[in-house]
Amino acid sequence: MDGTGGSDKDLPHVYLGGLVKRLLMLVAASSSVVLSIATMTATAAPAVFHHPYIPGHAVRSAGWSASNWSGYAKSGNYTSATAQWVVPSVSATSRASYSSAWVGIDGFTNSNLIQTGTESDYYNGSAHYNAWWEILPAAETPISSISVRPGDTMTASITKGSGSTWTITIRDATNGQSFTTNQSYSGPGTSVEWIEEAPTVGGRVATLAHYSSPDKFDPGTANGVSPGLTAADSGVMVQKRVQVSTPSNPDSDADGFNMSYGSTAPAPPSS
């Protein structure tokens, strides 16, 4: 007998009952943690990479084609590039889809790349927009200080400083928010680009998001002057043997163009 008047044979039941309660509480807590982790995994933004030009099926309507790039690229020697573009909206898709608008140096004729741009993506049931910068082989670095919305006008520049220091600047001209970073980069600077890209997500080139058209890239500069774009500098994106992104001819002063989702080239912007 214990001091409460109960028999000793009741103790195992009391002990087991308390143990069961504690086990149930642990299971509930573990379930909550698992659910929280699953929820975070489902809603977290994926790592996005912007890879160099990946050649695609040959086409006659442009100077080049790729499975991941569309827009304009020039070969030469470059120490600066600028761009202005309008952030496109994206339509809902049954599966995750991604699109990136950017200006960069290198990547067209080599495996290096320094760049900055914006994302217009659709995943987890909603559209997502953000600004970013990137130097390969790292993934893009999202810029949380700029609140990007479709229809915003972006300006960006990439400029070589002393030694291996480069300055990356991107600004949302619509809301006035901007970002600048100085980074070390040792690429050869042998190409310059203004691109609409299907980035690489999960190790594969993503399905291109259905972006609003026309998407305007104008004006741009290379080494501080007009890049002198020609039709031979233009490229289209071909995914699963379907042309999904097509640039216009250059505008009249050869420093800008429009992009359209699909295989039909838009008219160039007025300059």
Image: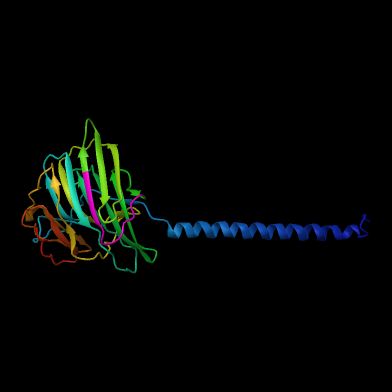
Look at the image and tell me whether residue 179 can be seen: yes
Total numbered badges shown on the rendered structure: 0
Instruction: Specify whether residue 156 is painted magenta.
Output: yes
x, y percent for residue 168: 26, 42
| Image quadrant containing the C terminus | bottom left
The part of the image, by quadrant, that contains residue 206 is bottom left
Look at the image and tell me whether residue 108 can be seen: no
Q: Residue at x 26, y 44 (%)?
A: 169
Q: Residue furthest top?
A: 163
Question: For the magenta stretch, what is the residue range?
Answer: 145-157
Instruction: Specify whether residue 72 is painted magenta.
Output: no
Q: Is residue 131 above or below residue 28?
A: above
x, y percent for residue 251: 8, 57
Specify the principal SS of the magenta part.
loop
Front in this rendered view, residue 225 or 17: 225
* Side of 232 relative to 123 (left or right): left
Front in this rendered view, residue 189 or 111: 189
Q: Is residue 93 above or below residue 160?
A: below
x, y percent for residue 62: 10, 58
| Image quadrant containing the N terminus | bottom right
* Side of 64 relative to 117 (left or right): left
The part of the image, by quadrant, that contains residue 213 is bottom left
Front in this rendered view, residue 121 or 37: 121
Front in this rendered view, residue 154 or 126: 154
Q: Residue at x 43, y 59 (%)?
A: 43
Q: Residue furthest front?
A: 176
The part of the image, by quadrant, that contains residue 101 is bottom left
* Coloration of the structure image: rainbow
x, y percent for residue 31: 58, 60
Q: Residue at x 54, y 58 (%)?
A: 34
